[in-house]
Amino acid sequence: MSYYHAGNCVVLGAELIHELRDNAQDATLHAMARALRGDLARWARSVGYDRCRAEGAGCTLSGDWHVSYHRSHLDRDGERIPAWYLCWSGYEHVWLPDGVSATSATRRAT
């Protein structure tokens, strides 16, 4: 299964984040990186871990104690949608399966 970075808690909203947190299991960086097949490395580069390392500052995603990793799921119409997220300095960044849009994963008020 392939995943994509669907966004962070600011973009995706509190309801989706609360559901992910309620269903979460702690994970490791290694497990998340393996499941996301390279997309986590792309995200890490996009937020500057590659520049930090290149400049000799020595910070890496694996050494950043402000990051926690989680496996979770969303329940939609009787279907369990797997998801991964990391909490990076208080912001949750969410990965959903390819083909599942963040808007369809967000519950609508009825």
Image (cartoon, helix red, strand yellow):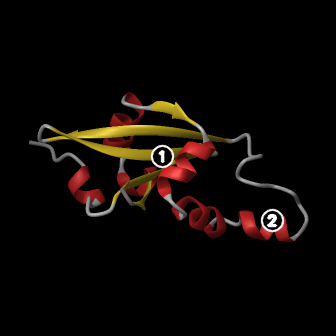
Q: Residue at x 26, y 63 (%)?
A: 99
Q: State how many labels appear.
A: 2
Residue 58 visible in the current orientation: yes
Which of the image's four quarters has the C terminus? top left
Identity of the residue furthest to the left in this view: 110
Q: Quadrant of residue 59?
A: bottom right
Left/right of residue 50 with respect to residue 6 in the rendered view: right
Q: Quadrant of residue 22?
A: top left
In the image, what residue type sits under mark 2?
Answer: Cys
Q: Which residue, given by chain and number where applicable, does mark 2 sit on?
A: 52
Q: Residues within 10 Å of mark 2 (few under 14, many from 20)?
A: some
Task: Tell me, for residue 58, which label it has, or none.
Answer: none
Viewer-closest of 10 and 80: 80
Q: Residues within 10 Å of mark 1 (few under 14, many from 20)?
A: many
**Residue 24: image x %, image y %?**
43, 32
In the image, what residue type sits under mark 1?
Answer: Tyr
**Residue 6: image x %, image y %?**
39, 60
**Residue 68: image x %, image y %?**
60, 39
Q: Which residue, given by chain and number where applicable, does mark 1 sit on?
A: 85
| Vertical arrangement, residue 52 with respect to residue 19, above or below | below
Viewer-closest of 58 and 47: 58
Left/right of residue 5 with respect to residue 31 in the rendered view: left
| Vertical arrangement, residue 109 with respect to residue 34, above or below | above
Left/right of residue 57 with respect to residue 28 in the rendered view: right
Residue 91 visible in the current orientation: no
| Vertical arrangement, residue 53 with respect to residue 62, above or below | below
Viewer-closest of 78 and 109: 78
Q: Residue at x 74, y 46 (%)?
A: 64
Q: Residue at x 36, y 56 (%)?
A: 1
Q: CA distance from mark 1 to mark 2?
A: 22 Å
| Mark found first going from the N terminus, 1 or 2 | 2
